[in-house]
């Protein structure tokens, strides 16, 4: 490859490197929640509509956010992409067996809602964790 070809490819290579930088997603609940830890299977069951309850009891209210954090959560924790998760929830909603996670604008909104309600569970970037929430699962 000559210099001119390399220069033409440089922006694409840069974009590839930026796209490879991913968030460190963690699953969080309120600092006041009785939930201490969850397994990957338990988190998957909740976020794919297999159960509506925390393992120790109590209804789990699911919240979500979009973007790279959501994509990483779907991939690392659920083993699915956004279209597959949407299809799962579409079937559950159509059959009357579930309500999809409430989608919020960003990690700040997720953290705010989770921190104020011990029944709420969501996922955020690890860098957004503070004393108002506790991490119950980290892939």
Image (cartoon, rainbow, N blue to C red):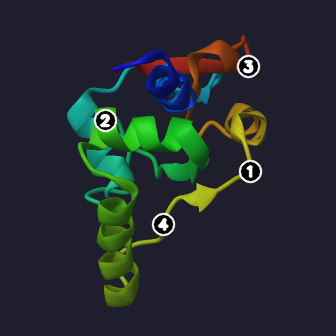
Q: Could you say which disc has been placed on residue 92 in the image?
A: none
As rendered, which of 75 and 113 lies closer to the eye?
Answer: 75
Q: Is residue 1 left or right of residue 23?
A: left
Tag nearer the camera, 2 or 4: 2
Q: Quadrant of residue 137?
A: top left
Q: What kind of element bears circle 4?
A: loop
**What is the x, y in percent for residue 138?**
40, 18
- 61, above or below 13, in the image: below
- Dot 1 alpha-carbon crowd within 10 angstroms: few under 14, some 14 to 19, many 20 or more: few
Q: Could you say which disc has been placed on residue 105 in the image?
A: 1
Distance (Cα) linking label 2 and label 4? 17 Å
As rendered, which of 105 and 28 lies closer to the eye?
Answer: 105
Q: What kind of element bears circle 3?
A: loop
Which is nearer the N-term, disc 4 or disc 3? 4
- Dot 3 alpha-carbon crowd within 10 angstroms: few under 14, some 14 to 19, many 20 or more: some
Distance (Cα) linking label 1 and label 4? 15 Å
As rendered, which of 6 and 86 lies closer to the eye?
Answer: 6
| Residue that mark 2 sits on | 77
The C terminus appears in which quarter of the rendering? top left
Distance (Cα) linking label 1 and label 2? 21 Å
């Amino acid at each position: 490859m000559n210099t001119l070809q390399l220069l033409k490819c440089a922006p694409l290579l840069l974009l590839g490197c930026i796209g490879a930088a991913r968030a460190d997603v963690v699953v969080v609940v309120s600092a006041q929640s009785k939930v201490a830890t969850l397994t990957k299977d338990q988190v998957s069951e909740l976020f794919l509509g297999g159960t509506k309850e925390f393992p120790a009891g109590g209804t789990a209210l699911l919240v979500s956010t979009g973007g790279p954090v959501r994509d990483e959560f779907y991939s690392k924790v659920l083993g699915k992409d956004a279209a597959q998760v949407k299809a799962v929830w579409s079937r559950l909603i159509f059959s009357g067996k579930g309500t999809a996670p409430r989608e919020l604008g960003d990690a700040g909104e997720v953290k705010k809602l989770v921190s104020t309600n011990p029944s709420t569970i969501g996922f955020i970037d690890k860098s957004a964790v503070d004393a108002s929430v506790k991490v119950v699962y980290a892939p």
